[in-house]
């Protein structure tokens, strides 16, 4: 086998593994989101659906967090999307990382609530993500769901 063939096989294998979790284009997870404020007070939302969708460039995903709120006193829940989050294969899962992303909700961007220091991972069974918004830390942990939300 030539060196060219080995390199080609290695790169194809990595790409195939990278998108295995997203073979249908999206994965839905259900889990818990916890928001911790700068004063260390926190609250959690249970059964939060999150839909992870691979973008056409095959190197970024969009994350749709459904029915969320970011303060206990927030009177309504919203659907929030984080677009174009880079991902890469790392060990047995896929890692997410983004320095800053402007969330979209209610049909528009919210630059005043830019999510920073986003990091996380996903595979075909679980999804975790953490990020900071203004002075609050947001963490989410979910498991793959068969529900289409």
Image: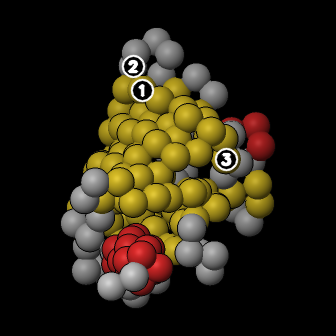
Residue 4 higher or lower than 39, as above or below: below
List the residue tagged with mark 2.
Answer: 41
Quadrant of the drawing holding the C terminus:
bottom left
Q: Marks 1 and 2, how far apart in space?
A: 6 Å
Q: Which residue is mark 3?
A: 101
SS state under label 2: loop
Instruction: Using the image, determine if residue 52 lies above or below residue 41.
Output: below
Which is more foreground, mark 2 or mark 3? 3
Label 1 residue SS: strand
* Foreground label between 1 and 3: 3
Q: Are marks 1 and 2 in contact (CB under 8 Å)?
A: yes
- Does the image show residue 142? no
Position of the N terminus, as image quadrant, is bottom left
Q: Nearer the viewer, mark 1 or mark 2?
A: 1
Residue 94 location (% of width, % of height): 37, 59
Number of residues whose C-alpha sits closer than 10 Å to that of mark 3, classed few (under 14), some (14–19) or many (20 or more):
many
**Residue 38 in sight:** yes
Q: Is residue 119 left or right of residue 30?
A: right
Seen at 63% across and 28% down, the residue is: 134
Local crowd size for mark 2, using a 10 Å CA cut-off: few (<14), some (14–19), many (≥20) = few
Residue 99 picture location, percent across and down: 62, 39
Estimate how packed mark 1 is, as few (under 14), some (14 to 19) or many (20 or more) residues with alpha carbons within 10 Å.
some
Q: Foreground residue, 35 or 1? A: 1
Q: Secondary structure at mark 3?
A: strand
Q: Earlier in the sequence, mark 2 or mark 3?
A: 2
Camera-nearest residue between 138 and 62? 62
Badge 1 or badge 2: first in the primary sequence: 1
Residue 56's quadrant in the figure?
Answer: bottom right
Q: Which residue is mark 1?
A: 36
Q: Position of residue 35 (x, y in %)?
A: 42, 34
Which of the two residues, 85 or 106, is positioned nearer the viewer here? 85
């Amino acid at each position: 086998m030539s060196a060219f063939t080995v390199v080609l096989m290695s790169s194809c294998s990595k790409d195939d593994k990278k998108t295995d979790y997203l073979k249908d284009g999206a994965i839905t997870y259900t889990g818990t989101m916890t928001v911790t404020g700068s004063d260390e007070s926190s609250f959690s939302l249970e059964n939060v659906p999150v839909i992870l969708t691979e973008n056409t460039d095959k190197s970024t995903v969009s994350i749709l967090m459904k029915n969320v709120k970011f303060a206990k006193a927030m009177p309504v829940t919203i659907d929030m999307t984080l677009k174009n989050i880079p991902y890469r294969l790392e060990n047995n899962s896929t890692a997410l990382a983004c320095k800053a992303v402007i969330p979209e909700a209610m049909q528009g961007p919210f630059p005043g609530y830019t999510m920073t220091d986003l990091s996380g991972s996903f595979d075909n069974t679980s999804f975790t993500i953490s990020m900071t918004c203004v002075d609050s830390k947001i963490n989410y942990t979910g498991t793959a769901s068969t529900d289409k939300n």
